[in-house]
């Protein structure tokens, strides 16, 4: 496969929206929050599910064409075929590139394309003098959580009911150089 990572253009949007954004997972990350006088404890546990579940993407892909100009996007192209994308911004956290979406089409998952997109997003950040990358992931998206942990990202926070679907977002970060 001969892939190219480049800035997204408007003609890519229909193909990117048509990608299968859902994932299958055998695990979820469960958030446990305990409050005691003078102390709050948060723990995350990976829970094996009794069966594989299909998880829909937390943002409607149909809205992609209407919002692509708000946040920069990079597309992965295989010839004229759009096979993946990443959305990012540098306005949420000072000195950090915030990666909001990493979507890889189902036929090419598991081939390192997600990692290449994250590296491209970090290169984009380095060109702007940023020193950290932060990625947000649904707590149900065990495959992406495993990938970012493998890449050396560390858990740095969460937000309950972050997505319109009311799913929990987990945040991971790492320094970039």
Image: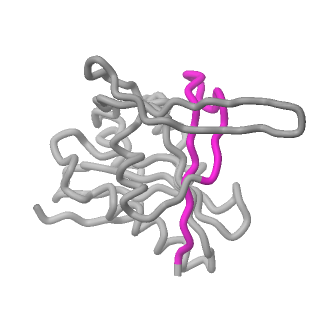
In the rendered image, the quadrant that contains the N terminus is bottom left
Q: Position of residue 83 (x, y in %)?
A: 25, 49
Q: Position of residue 129 (x, y in %)?
A: 62, 80
122 or 27: which is nearer to us? 27
User: Image quarter for residue 151?
Assistant: bottom left
55, above or below 73, in the image: above
129, above or below 70, in the image: below
Q: Position of residue 35 (x, y in %)?
A: 78, 30
162 or 45: which is nearer to us? 45
Q: Position of residue 32 (x, y in %)?
A: 61, 30
Membership of 23 in magenta stretch: no
Q: Is residue 9 left or right of residue 68?
A: left
Which range is magenta?
156-176
| Residue drawn at point x = 41 percent, y = 62 percent | 118
| Residue drawn at point x = 47 percent, y = 34 percent | 29
Q: Is residue 83 left or right of residue 158?
A: left
Q: Is residue 10 visible?
A: yes
Q: Is residue 69 left or right of residue 36?
A: left
User: Image quarter for residue 164?
Assistant: top right
Q: Is residue 75 left or right of residue 89?
A: left
Q: Is residue 9 visible?
A: no
Number of numbered discs on residues: 0
| Residue drawn at point x = 41 percent, y = 49 percent | 102
The furthest residue to the right: 38
128 or 142: which is nearer to us? 142
| Residue drawn at point x = 55 percent, y = 22 percent | 165
């Amino acid at each position: 496969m001969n892939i190219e990572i480049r800035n997204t253009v408007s003609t890519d949007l229909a193909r990117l929206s048509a990608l299968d954004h859902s994932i299958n997972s055998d695990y979820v990350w469960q958030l446990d929050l305990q409050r005691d006088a003078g102390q709050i404890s948060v723990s995350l546990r990976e829970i094996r599910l009794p069966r594989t579940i299909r998880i829909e993407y937390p943002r409607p892909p149909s809205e992609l064409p209407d919002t692509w100009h708000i946040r920069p996007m990079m597309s992965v192209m295989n010839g004229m075929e759009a096979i993946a994308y990443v959305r990012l911004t540098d306005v949420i956290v000072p000195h950090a590139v915030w990666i909001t979406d990493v979507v890889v089409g189902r036929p090419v998952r598991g081939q390192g394309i997600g990692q290449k997109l994250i590296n491209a997003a970090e290169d984009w950040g380095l060109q702007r003098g940023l020193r950290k990358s932060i990625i947000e992931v649904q707590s149900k998206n065990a495959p992406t959580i495993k990938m970012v942990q493998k890449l050396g990202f560390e858990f740095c926070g969460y937000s309950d009911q972050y997505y319109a679907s009311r799913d929990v977002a987990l945040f991971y970060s790492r320094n970039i150089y």
